[in-house]
Each structure stands twice: as structure tokens, then as C-alpha cells.
């Protein structure tokens, strides 16, 4: 049986008094103790070995910990080490059987306890070192969000984002230095946010209230076209919903959106689950810039953008689990490159709006099988003083699964 050599101790603002006997012993018995300068100061009276502050870059400290394998090492972490903490990083390099972990209540748990919010009904979101735009998909009336920020400027920036997105009367409660002697809890309406002297260690509790016209992103695929910035090069909402269904996103998968236009397919793919990722390939620089803006506005800033023309632009990209090809392309070489790159069992969905692309898909369907479907959408429109049906361009869709 493996003997644990690494201890990971979650410590709060209350320092050593908030730790149990076993956690204190793990600190005292360690030959080397790693942690941030604040954590090392909180635990200073218990440290008998060498205290080492984190090195820049952080990966250097991970390497240093691994080189000490077999010796008694302790890592100090904020709150729960496995909730957006260093524990998850270490577990990618060190087997759990070699660790002893002593969790402390996380900032999320402490904030929920102070507010009387049932944690299972709350969205816990870490924005520490991450774009604030990540909160956008979660802004729904009545939602309760706990958002961990990076520093003292985070709460005001969040309040500004809420106000600009139409949620200005939401209540933003800033909880600072939770669990310590300087703990403070203060609330403001987002649009009138004026808190100052905020502790860098803070978490924001947001009670979301929407004003008329607020930018609410529905949870279903097929979002309103008007939510996207586009120049007409966009897969329309009805076809987009059918396309996302055909792409069938599964947890942790990567999509290539080739000829991305406005990026709507890649964006809705990523909105389906936080674990999903996408690469948007677009040749036009103006459209590429538009995709980037859309990704931020929809709260998926991690969407990767490749500016270039397929198939050349596809070289050296991570192999995808699914590929979408928009309606205007008709290059057999691009389709061949996409099929070659697709992982076994991956899905390819290609939409045709031109006769040339339709002919290519008809031929590929005859050669390789798959499903071929034609979609037609008609919308009511004015005809003089009355109304009638106005058809949109029909779409031919080929869906193929790689053996």
C-alpha cells in the first residue's frame, strides 16, 4: 500500500484556529511547506520545516513538489483544495493514494451560509483569473450566483457588466475576507454600485433581476438571430437548432466550425455544456473579429479562432469529435481534409445552400452513406394588406459518422 507523502491543507482566514488536529500536524510534520505568502503567514507558528512561497510561473512550483516525492511535503491552499483549487492541479501529476487532503469550507460554502442560500440551488462560478463574460449565459431572472473574483476591482466590473446587459437592478452582495476577523458583507444595486475599499479576497453573491430588454440567453439551441452580430452570413435559427441536434454534442468534445461566418454554430455548441470546446475557422478577417465579439457576448470567450482558408487552415489543429461545414463551400479537398481529421466515431454535418455544394453532398452520400435531409422554412410576411408565406432558402444537410 502506498504511503502518502503529500498533505494538502485547506486553510481559511481564521488561520490555524480553524484547523483540526490532523491538519495542524500535517503542517508541523512537513519538511517543506508550499503556499502563497498569505497562507504561509497564517500558518507560520505551526511550520517547523522549510517554508517555500509559490514560484512564478506556478508550474515551477508543481515541478518542485514532484521532485520532493517521498519526503514529507505540505501544500497550503485556500478553502477546499479540490473546488477550483490547487488540489485539482496536483492530482493531474500525483496519484490520490499519495496524498492526504484536509479540506476547509470553501468561499462558496461560507458565502451560502452567511446568506442562507441553499448551495445546491446556487450557481457557483469561479471568475478568478478568468473572463467575466463567463457569467453571461447564467443571467436569468431569479437566478442566484456566487462568483469568486480575482481582486478588489472584480465586484465593480461585474456590476458594470450586469448593468450593460440589462440586469442593472440586480442585487450584488460583496462578501470579503470570509471567516476571518475582517469579514465584511455589503450589498448594492448593480446600476448604483459604489462600494470602495473592497478586500481583494472577495466573492460576489448576485440576485439576478432582469429589466425589460435584458440580454437573456435561452437554454435551448436555435437562439434568435438578432442576438448575434452578423452580416447575413449566419446559419438561421431554425436550421441552427437542427444542426446542433445533428452534431449531437457530448461532454468534453471538440467541434470544428469550418467557414464559421458569425460563429453561431460554434457558440451554441459551447453553450450546450461548459465542458465543450470549439475552433472556428474563418477566412475573412472582419468576420473573424465579429466571431470574437460574439463569443464574448455569449459568454464563451474560450472559443478558439483560426483565420485562414480550409483545408490549409486545418493543419496541425487538434483532431475534432465533430465538424460542421457551412452552406457555401464546394471544395472536395476541404471535405476530404475534414473527414481525414475527424476522430473515429466522430460526426460530420455539412449544410448546402448552393447547387454546387448540394451536388458534392449528393455524391458523398452515394459513396459513403450517412443521412441526407432537405429542410425548408417558410415565414409569414406581408403581401399588400394581407399576409402570406415567404420561403427561405432550402438547406440540404448531410450527416455522416466516421467508422
Image (cartoon, helix red, strand yellow):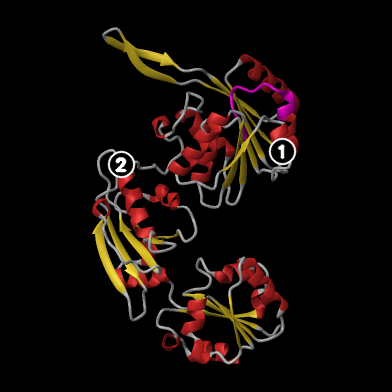
User: Quick one: SS at disc 2?
Assistant: loop
Find residue 387 and report its horizontal and vertical position in percent: 31, 13
Residue 399 found in image quarter: top right
Q: Residues within 10 Å of mark 2 (few under 14, many from 20)?
A: some
Q: Is residue 330 magenta?
A: yes
Q: Front-most of 71 and 363?
A: 71
| 254 horizontally vs 81: left or right | right
Reading the image, the residue beneath label 2 is 214
Tell me how far mark 1 sits from mark 2, CA to CA.
42 Å
Residue 402: assigned label: 1
Find residue 167 and report its horizontal and vertical position in percent: 29, 47
User: Quick one: SS at disc 1?
Assistant: loop
Residue 36: assigned label: none
Find residue 290 and report its horizontal and vertical position in percent: 50, 34
Going from N to C along the chain, the mark reached first, 1 or 2, is: 2
Residue shown at 33%/72% (left/top)? 113
Find residue 259 and report its horizontal and vertical position in percent: 60, 30
Instruction: Decide if residue 256 is in sight here.
Output: yes
Residue shown at 44%/32% (left/top)? 229
Residue 291 sits above or below residue 118 on the image: above
What span is in magenta?
A: 324-335
Residue 52 sits above or below residue 239 on the image: below
Q: Residues within 10 Å of mark 1 (few under 14, many from 20)?
A: some
Q: Front-most of 64 and 348?
A: 64
Amino acid at each position: 500500500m502506498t504511503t502518502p507523502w503529500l498533505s494538502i491543507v485547506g486553510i481559511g482566514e481564521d488561520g490555524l484556529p480553524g484547523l483540526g488536529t490532523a491538519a495542524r500536524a500535517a503542517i508541523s510534520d512537513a519538511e517543506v511547506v508550499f503556499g502563497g505568502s498569505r497562507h504561509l503567514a497564517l500558518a507560520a507558528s505551526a511550520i517547523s520545516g522549510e517554508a517555500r512561497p509559490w514560484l512564478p510561473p506556478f508550474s515551477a512550483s508543481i515541478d518542485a513538489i514532484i521532485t520532493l516525492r517521498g519526503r514529507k511535503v505540505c501544500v497550503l491552499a485556500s478553502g477546499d483544495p479540490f473546488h477550483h483549487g490547487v488540489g485539482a492541479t496536483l492530482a493531474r501529476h500525483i496519484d490520490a493514494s499519495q496524498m492526504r487532503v484536509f479540506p476547509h469550507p470553501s468561499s462558496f460554502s461560507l458565502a451560502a451560509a452567511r446568506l442562507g442560500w441553499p448551495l445546491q440551488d446556487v450557481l457557483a462560478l469561479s471568475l478568478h483569473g478568468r473572463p467575466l463574460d463567463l457569467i453571461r449565459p447564467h443571467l436569468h431572472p431569479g437566478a442566484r450566483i456566487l462568483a469568486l473574483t480575482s481582486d478588489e476591482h472584480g465586484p465593480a466590473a461585474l456590476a458594470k457588466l450586469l448593468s450593460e446587459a440589462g440586469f442593472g437592478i440586480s442585487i450584488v452582495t460583496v462578501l470579503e475576507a470570509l471567516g476571518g476577523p475582517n469579514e465584511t458583507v455589503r450589498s448594492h444595486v448593480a446600476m448604483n454600485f459604489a462600494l470602495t475599499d473592497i478586500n481583494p479576497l472577495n466573492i460576489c453573491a448576485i440576485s439576478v433581476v432582469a429589466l425589460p430588454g435584458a440580454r437573456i440567453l435561452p437554454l435551448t439551441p436555435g437562439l434568435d438571430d438578432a442576438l448575434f452580430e452578423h452580416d447575413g452570413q449566419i446559419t438561421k435559427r431554425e436550421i441552427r437548432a437542427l444542426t446542433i441536434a445533428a452534431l449531437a454534442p457530448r461532454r468534453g468534445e471538440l467541434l470544428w466550425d469550418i467557414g464559421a461566418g458569425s460563429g453561431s454554430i460554434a457558440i451554441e455548441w459551447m453553450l450546450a455544456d461548459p465542458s465543450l470546446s470549439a475552433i472556428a475557422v474563418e477566412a475573412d478577417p472582419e468576420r473573424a473579429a465579429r466571431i470574437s465579439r460574439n463569443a464574448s457576448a455569449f459568454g464563451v470567450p474560450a472559443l478558439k479562432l483560426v483565420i485562414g482558408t480550409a483545408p490549409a487552415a486545418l493543419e496541425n489543429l487538434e483532431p475534432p469529435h465533430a465538424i460542421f461545414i457551412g452552406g457555401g463551400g464546394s471544395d472536395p479537398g476541404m471535405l476530404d481534409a475534414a473527414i481525414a481529421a475527424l476522430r473515429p466515431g466522430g460526426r460530420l454535418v455539412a449544410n448546402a445552400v448552393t447547387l454546387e455544394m448540394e451536388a458534392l453532398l449528393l455524391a458523398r452520400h452515394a459513396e459513403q452513406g450517412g443521412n441526407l435531409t432537405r429542410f425548408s422554412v417558410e415565414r409569414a410576411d406581408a403581401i399588400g394588406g394581407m399576409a402570406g408565406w415567404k420561403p427561405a432558402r432550402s438547406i440540404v444537410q448531410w450527416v455522416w459518422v466516421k467508422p
